[in-house]
Image (cartoon, rainbow, N blue to C red):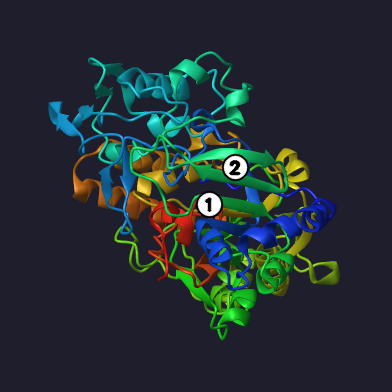
Amino acid sequence: MTTRRIRPIRSAAAAAAFAAGVTAGVTACSAPGDGTGGDDAKAAESVVIGVASEPDTLSPLLGYGKDGNSKIFDGLLARDTDLKLKPALATALPKVADGGKTYTYTLRDGVKFSDGEPLTAQDVVYTYRTVLDAKTNNTARSELDAVKNVRASGDDTVVFTLKYPYAAFAARTVLPIVPEHIAGEQDPNTGAFNTEPVGTGPYVLAGWSKGEKLTFKANPHYWGGEPAVKSFTMAIIADDNVRATRLRSGDLDGAVLPPNLATTFKKDDGRRTYQARSYDFRAVTLPTTGKVTGDRAIRQALDAAVDRQAMVDKILDGAGRPAYGPLPADDPWYARGIERPHDLDKAERILDEAGWTAGSGGVRAKDGQRASFTLYYPSGDKVRQDHALAYASDAKKAGIEVKVEGATWEVIEPRMKHDAVLAGFGSVGDPDFGLYTLLHSSLAGDGFNNMAGYDNKAVDEALDAGRRSQDPKKREAAYDEIQRALVEDPGYTFLTHIDHLYVLADRWDGLTTQLEPHEHGFASGPWWNIEDWQPKK
């Protein structure tokens, strides 16, 4: 549920260099053919997708692919179009025993890694033990907190023993499995495996030019059969407008686009637009250690002052919904009745009662401290920039000065413990997946976990109860309590839940979208099942 695992290209110059140096090759493999059968066949077998960002690493040991949909790796389980769990490297869903504390998986026969070596239960054990090792730099380790032990029983059986019954554990086993015979010989934090991965998935990495592109080709040893799309390229193009231009010119087969640019393709008969619902939300982190944002009254006033519906209408062109918390309103775990209208009068009352009085330039002050703070957003992200500017405009009407600055993540990261950030989060599968890392005080300051430094004892207790209980009613009560606590004691200003938009050349069958997490474009999108695509007849 981080913002950082997918990293924007570092500069416009890099994007321009990529555009100039690679366009010819991209056009050759993806643009419509000249009518010859050979060109048409080649175009059907190769796909080029434009995305905004790339991963820091391709190693699951450091968090890559932990929510599924990696094309290089497989987990014990996977998700279908409707996000239901299905067997992948395992032959079936796990056998659960001991009151929900023992999970047993049997591995599929005949699975090989892309180097031809067989998958064994020991590879599964190695993967999970390495992720759980405190020496491994995996900020998602807390997601496997329930695991007490993992062991192999022969070559084809893996047994997990949990510390406590964890209702959502099976969904955690979409974690990709790596080969011990390669990764086990390296330092998981610095080894070559991070950029030269070997897995059991439908594709293998053929090349990676950092900041430019990643190229994948079909895995000859893939257990699921040979895909019709023989190769694909993820072109890293940070600038939204450049992606749209490249798509329009035929250099790209498809791209992830913001709403205002996606709409320009709606009347294009040769392309199709896909709209995916998501748990992806934009929020402003309000660090509790900040001189201004640390005041609960400031956070409450901002929550009341923000006009969420206007952001949906004007920034997202309607492709989204107001966010009143980390869960979207159509989620079954959503706490009914927490919706808050845009209420500037309420914001002003809260500030008045807390002693924040009108000062010079219309900015309030209290005890000599001006109600002013900086809000960072990642440069090149137009949607976040627009959210940040709208947020600052709403805050100003209440007497709070929000100074908006765009910067690279290298600049933002050292500051985010004390400065506000226009961040993106959201996980699918279970409320524990998204809420625990966002809010639990034990994770404050742990990379992109709990960026606000949120510390609320009642919320911690409810998060622990939701994670450890098997009783659906108790879990529902816990997550209801958390969402209502965020209304009274906000650590973030939740703004919008965003629908993801993709535009692709209409040349394949089998394309679908899933309900998507925050991280999208690279792993999620209509290409989540690219191995199942078929060329149109």
Question: 417 and 457: which one is in front?
Answer: 417
Q: Quadrant of residue 240?
A: bottom right
Vertical order, 497 against 72 (above or below): below
Q: In screen coordinates, is 210 left or right of 312?
A: right
Q: In screen coordinates, is 238 left or right of 272?
A: right
Q: Quadrant of residue 484?
A: bottom left
Question: 137 and 77: which one is in front?
Answer: 77
Q: In screen coordinates, is 140 left or right of 330?
A: right
Question: Is label 1 in a helix, a strand or a loop?
Answer: loop
Residue that badge 2 annotates: 5
On the rendered image, what quadrant is the C terminus found in? Answer: bottom left
Label 1, residues with CA under 10 Å away: few <14, some 14-19, many ≥20: many
Question: Is label 2 in a helix, a strand or a loop?
Answer: loop
Q: In screen coordinates, is 485 left or right of 390?
A: left
Residue that badge 1 annotates: 519
Hey, which residue is sitting farthest bottom in the picture?
A: 267
Q: Which mark is residue 174?
A: none
N-terminal label among 1 and 2: 2
